[in-house]
Image: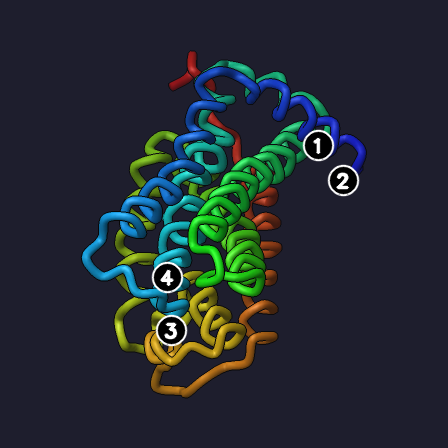
Amino acid sequence: MNPKLVLDVVRFELRRSLSIGRITIWTILVLFPVALVATVRLFGENREDNPETWGLILYFLIPEVVCLLGLLLWATPAVSTEVEGQTWIYLAMRRSGRNLVLVGKYATAVLWSCSAAWAAATGCTLLLGSTGGFKLWLVICVLSFLSCLAHAALYLIIGTIFFRRTMVTAVFYTLTVEYGLAFVPAMANRLTVNYRLRGLLAEWMDWETARTVTENLGGQESAWLHIIVLLTISAGLVMASVLRLTWTELPTQQEG
């Protein structure tokens, strides 16, 4: 796969995404955590400057909520939009065309969602002042990037398998696995992305509140192990999505 052609797809998708609707969604994703933190900061009954409490709030709002909402909109329908727009047949006729578009849309979804998360993290950190600090901002930004890489790959494989009920399936997966199974005190929750992200938050910030959530029957795990698992999940699922499209004939609008 030619990286230059992938970059061409990314540039095309970014130009096509610069619409009023997409920019409005991006702005809402940025302003949602900023407005919530500002409201709690100014009008909340408990406004004590506790870095650990605010850090956990930022973690939940940005890597957990902003990233996933953005990826649901940009990564999940990567294939279904081409099928519904009746352009898939033209991509399938070109050599590696479908794979280039898939990887390009994956990268575009990561860029859009990650940029919204970084902007939200910057705004929230500025509102917190000395309570947050540069370290918290850096950790939230890195966790957001890793969250976008892994969750975008997850939504991509969902989109290549369930291309007719893509959004419904992705939302069901998010609620049952990432927000359900991830909090179950069992070995199965180690299969979730959020478990790894919380482990990194606990290791990097050395916060006991976060650490008690990530602890499991097997004890604590190193930060490098969490990173390796997240990167492996991301690369493996993207490759699986490419293979899925290579071996599958998707029905066109006329055939369906």
How many tags in the picture? 4
Quick one: SS at disc 4? helix
Query: Looking at the image, is mark 3 or mark 1 earlier in the sequence?
Result: 1
Horizontal arrangement in the rendering, residue 127 relative to residue 138 (left or right):
left
In three-dimensional space, the C-alpha distance between marks 2 and 4, rounded to whole angstroms, equals 43 Å
What residue is at 45 percent from the left and 84 percent from the top? Answer: 220
The kind of residue tagged 1 is Ser
Q: Quadrant of the N terminus?
A: top right
Which residue lies under the disc numbered 3? 210
Q: Are marks 4 and 3 in contact (CB under 8 Å)?
A: no
Residue 58, compared with residue 190, is above or below; it is above
Query: Looking at the image, is mark 1 or mark 2 earlier in the sequence?
Result: 2
Observer-nearest residue: 123 or 60?
Answer: 123
The kind of residue tagged 4 is Trp
Which residue lies under the disc numbered 4? 54
The kind of residue tagged 2 is Met
- Label 3 Cα neighbours within 10 Å, binned few <14 / some 14-19 / many ≥20: many
In three-dimensional space, the C-alpha distance between marks 1 and 4, rounded to whole angstroms, equals 46 Å
Which residue lies under the disc numbered 2? 1
The kind of residue tagged 3 is Ala
Which residue lies under the disc numbered 1? 96
Residue 134: give x, y in percent of width and height. 57, 60
What residue is at 34 percent from the left and 86 percent from the top? Answer: 217
Q: Which mark is residue 232?
A: none
Given this view, does label 4 or label 3 mark the residue nearer the observer?
4
Residue 92, visible in the rendered structure? no
Query: Looking at the image, is mark 2 or mark 4 earlier in the sequence?
Result: 2
